[in-house]
Image: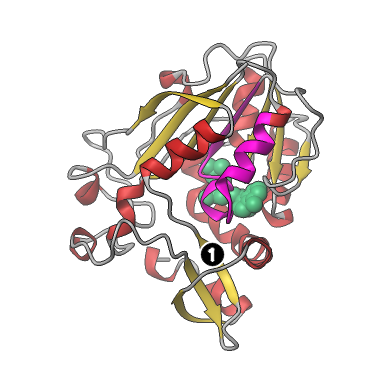
């Protein structure tokens, strides 16, 4: 399967016929993304499962591992919420470090893979189906939270998600999340030479939506500038401590969607925000 036709099954199941740049509200986006991640879950796991591992914490297509980066600090004994966990490999790695992870995802299809991996590895990570916009977790019940490309790009209001995380985290708890680097927005999602020419404005926040024949969204992704993230974090009570832009490692040849060695050697593909809940 090539990167170009990797989503063909999900697109066929959902009746995707094209792309629209138009405003999309939270309810439409969440419904579309729930259906899309359910439809794409098997293909996502088939394409990336070996790279992500069963119990490994890989932050991004550049291959940065929490074992090396330690962005969450020492997690032993901590209750950690993984937001948009997918197959929950990060949570299983966290459990191996002595943490008590809680793995949350919108998609039952993705959580089915997480349950299968739990069974394969003997892990007993709690798997919780929920949107990041409404976490079924008690106030101040978590000591840390993390997300590797889960949820944040797919929600209409990132401030609403940050506010929810502020509610469930105890004071001073780390909240670390990886997203597509905002500068990638200006380029086509193409790992090859076509992905090197800027075609759309960085400052245009109109979301990317795929649509069916009736114009209903079947997949939605939101763009925020770096400044938007900084303002949303400070506006919801998080202190930004570091912004990690992983470099493409020498000898790393694996292409993941639009992430490729060609583009990786020229500009960043991932931004990892290392933040802490203000007391
Ligand atoms: C790119 S995958 C990342 C999965 C996993 N973290 C990984 O590194 O492979 C994005 C995940 O975010 C989940 N997701 C999308 N919107 C969400 C939302 N509003 N709340 C929670 N999870 C969401 C999807 O179901 C999917 O599992």
Left or right: residue 140 versus residue 19 is: right
Left or right: residue 234 versus residue 32 is: left
Q: Name the residue under label 1.
A: 220
Most foreground residue, 266 or 39: 266
Image: 241 above or below 32: above
- Identified at 41% across, 19% down, the residue is 68
Image: 173 above or below 39: above
Image: 93 above or below 38: above
Image: 243 above or below 88: above
Q: How many badges with numbers are in the image?
A: 1
Residue 218 among magenta residues: no
Q: In which quarter of the image is residue 38?
A: bottom right
Quadrant holding the N terminus:
bottom left
- Callout 1: SS: strand
Where residue 172 sits in the image (x, y, percent)? Answer: 60, 15
Where residue 11 sits in the image (x, y, percent)? Answer: 55, 75
- Identified at 73% across, 50% down, the residue is 112
Where residue 86 sits in the image (x, y, percent)? Answer: 62, 46
Where residue 261 sits in the image (x, y, percent)? Answer: 24, 47
Most foreground residue, 125 or 204: 204
- Identified at 32% across, 45% down, the residue is 269
Crowdedness near tag 1: few (<14), some (14–19) or many (≥20) residues, C-alpha within 10 Å: many
- Identified at 70% across, 52% down, the residue is 106
Segment tinted magenta in the rendering: 144-166
């Amino acid at each position: 399967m090539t990167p170009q036709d990797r989503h063909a099954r999900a697109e066929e199941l959902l009746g995707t016929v094209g792309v629209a740049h138009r405003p999309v509200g939270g309810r439409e986006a969440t419904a579309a993304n729930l259906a899309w991640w359910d439809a794409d879950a098997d293909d996502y796991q088939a394409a990336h499962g070996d790279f992500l591992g069963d119990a490994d914490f890989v932050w991004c297509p550049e291959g940065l591992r929490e074992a090396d980066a330690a962005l969450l600090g020492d997690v032993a004994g901590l209750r950690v919420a993984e937001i948009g966990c997918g197959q929950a490999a990060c949570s299983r790695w966290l459990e191996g470090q002595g943490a008590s992870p809680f793995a949350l995802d919108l998609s039952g299809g993705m959580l089915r893979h997480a349950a299968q991996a739990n069974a394969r590895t003997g892990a007993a990570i709690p798997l919780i189906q929920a949107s990041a916009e409404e976490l079924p977790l008690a106030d101040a019940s978590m000591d840390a939270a993390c997300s590797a490309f889960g949820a944040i790009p797919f929600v209409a209001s990132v401030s609403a998600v940050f506010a929810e995380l502020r509610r469930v985290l105890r004071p001073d708890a780390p909240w670390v999340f990886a997203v597509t680097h905002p500068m990638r927005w200006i380029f086509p999602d193409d790992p090859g030479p076509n992905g090197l020419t800027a075609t759309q404005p960085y400052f245009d926040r109109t979301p990317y939506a795929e649509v069916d024949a009736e114009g209903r969204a079947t997949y939605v992704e939101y763009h925020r500038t770096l400044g938007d993230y900084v303002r949303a974090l400070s506006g919801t009570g998080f202190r930004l401590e570091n912004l990690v832009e992983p470099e493409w490692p020498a000898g790393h040849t694996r292409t993941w969607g639009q992430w490729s060695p060609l583009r990786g050697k020229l500009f960043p593909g991932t931004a990892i925000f290392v933040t802490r809940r203000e007391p």
